[in-house]
Image: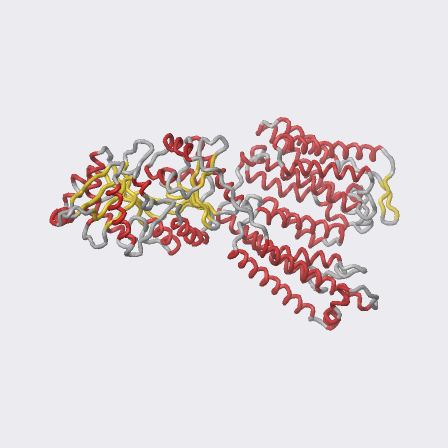
Amino acid sequence: MLQFLVSRRGVIIWQVLFILLSTTWLFAPHLNHFLSYRTSLISQYETPTQPYSLLMRVADLSGGLLLLGMGFAYLKKIGARTIGYLLIITGTGMALDPILTTTCKVALGECVEYYSLAFVLHATETVMTASAFFVLGVYDAWLRKKMVSIVFVFFQIAYFTLFLTQYATHAHYNTLSQFLYQLVLVVWACWFCRDFLINRIGSRSQSGEAQLIKYFVATWAFLNGILAIVISFADIHLVGRIRGIYFAGDSAWLAQHSVIIGVILLYLSRHLARGERRARQIFLAIAAIETLKYSVVTPNAKLLLLYLLTFCLLFIWRDVFDRGTIPMTWRIRAKDLVFMISALLVAVLTSLVLLDSDTRIAGITTRAIDNFVDYSLRTKIVPKNHLQSVLLAHTISAFILVSALTILWILFKPSRKVGHAPKNYQRVKELLSTYSDTPEDYFKLWPTDKNYFWDAEQTGFIAYKISGPVVFALADPIAPQSQKQKLLEEFVSWAKGRSLRVCFLPVYENSLELYEKSGLAILQIGASAIIKSEEFLNETANDKWWRWQKNRALKAGYEYSPHLPPHSGDLLQNLRAVSDAWLGKGGHKERGFALGYYDEAYLQKCMVHSLKDESGRIIAFTNQLPHFKQSATATVDLLRYEPDAQNTMPYLLYKTIESTYEQGYSLFDLGFVPFAAAKSPVLSIARILGSGRFSARGLEQFKNKFDPHWQPNYMAYDGDLADLALIAINLEKAMEQKV
């Protein structure tokens, strides 16, 4: 049982039970009509003579036992002795609280406590439990420097100060202040017990499950926003009959509060669908406020239960909402603005229909609109029968004001830029020389269009580039094998904190587990044609098609030449002419990021393989990627040729394979091929990656002439299938840009 408590599923179930059982006293003002819901304390509601007190005491006892059990789990299974003992002390105090009840006498809705042994024992236990919570919070704030625990400690100090000054026990704040204090204690304990275990139990939901949860919460926030606004504007049926809640007395503050909450929830719904952490935190705070409102301010059991469950589910789904605020562009602002205006129009139209639902409400509405300026901006005495129209006008004013502020916030919200670590190229070279395992790792150093994510000790890095809301990273991390997983997870967490989608490519089969453990989805986007050089030269190159290609090249007078760096200016000038001719036809264009482009400094580091015509003019060339460590595989990057020259590439590649085999390379990487049966977004990605080497059309057929071994290429990404189009669009931009 203790082992189950420290598992992910066990902690989640524990959280749900702990919150629900430890907060049943929220329903006390609704269940108990003998005591004032504005001045009565939890302990007074739980005295044995009060209705439903047994139910609340049993629930509180169960909550205390749950915390006690978690303390033993920490002690026995985790080995966190100090935390374990503090949780046991705190849980014991919570369990004793409903047993050692206070004593009081009811008079005119007040439960007046009197001095007795039970009163002393209850007061002593209350002080000890509160002290245990305080010590536990201070210890965690000191140990882990968590902001949540630091704020919790200051909150306790502030409440204690208010309690000593007796301001917290003022008639208007007595119940509300204590309910708030107790709710914060329960929520913090619930957060702490899971957060302390987070590295041990993991915190990820499945991708499909997480997406479903985000859309569900976003939809609920949207509907909740509409309903909150509607309730403010009319006396209607909603979860039972709600009468006199918003237009009672001489103040419309509850109606205005509901309007403000409604507009905020409409705004948050779009951000919740994106999985933004801050949107969840705000919705969590709103759910807590509404829970207290329907518990103490305007007791309503059904709405209280609805918001309490909302709070509980949002609380346990913390790992689903793991993104930071999305970086703002004018395109994103425009989409957010259209969404917000549409949502406000839905709320307005719904409200207008309901405000015209019967003669009484229509009369109130008409009077409010006709005298809107007078009622909203001018102070004047109005007849008593006009009071509801005045209050409605005030509520409409609040709606207009908060809507305008929300729209201005969308348009002019500050957007912080993503910070990057300094580009320490010398350290990059050192680590590549130590940990590189493929010639393609050269693209992590060049082109210089990438930034670097480092671990704390700079013993490893990930090369990445941001395009739109997606961060593209070159696989795999460059680090000691034992540190790759941690570095990868830190990078994913860093990207999510900035609301960026993550995409690693190209990923090969031997690294798939690394990315799967980090919670990324895997998709095969193609395969690389790997040629066994000896087998190709001795067998494949002697078949009928290859004999025909070689004979045609010889008859045309083509001559192959290898060129070791450093290269002369004349050679580079000739290569430039071929490259420019190649770029001038067929829609070819330079690529960056995971592919090279024509650059003389780059070519000076590469061995170049060229083909000349019978006049000695270079008509085709390719460059062999340099490598940081000895490798069995030779890899080429640029494949450029004169468009008017015929049949140059097969013969050039044949001679290049022959040359690299003589250098000691047993394998030759002919490059990426998009797979044929891909759907639109996937095919777009494949074409982008393949276009720097060959045309996508006929590519597989051409490379099969080399009789290669097809090595699957994968993409590891954060998101679901709906994100693939977004990734494809922004990958195109990332590949086009270069420095």
Q: Can the viewer see residue 125?
A: yes
In the image: residue 634, left or right of residue 355: left
Q: Name the residue nearer the viewer: 176 or 417.
A: 417
Instruction: Kindly indicate the quadrant of the structure image that contains residue 465.
Output: top left
Q: Name the residue nearer the viewer: 434 or 396.
A: 434
* Quarter of the image where the C terminus is located: top left
Q: Name the residue nearer the viewer: 124 or 398.
A: 398
In the image: residue 438, left or right of residue 390: left
Residue drawn 44% across the image and 33% down it: 460
Residue drawn 30% across the image and 41% down it: 603
Residue drawn 68% across the image and 59% down it: 259
Instruction: Kindly indicate the quadrant of the structure image that contains residue 362.
Output: bottom right
Instruction: Kindly indicate the quadrant of the structure image that contains residue 562.
Output: top left
Residue 44, how many percent across, how many down?
Answer: 80, 42
The answer to whether 231 is drawn above or below residue 80 in the figure is below
In the image: residue 276, left or right of residue 228: left
Q: Name the residue nearer the viewer: 227 or 505.
A: 505
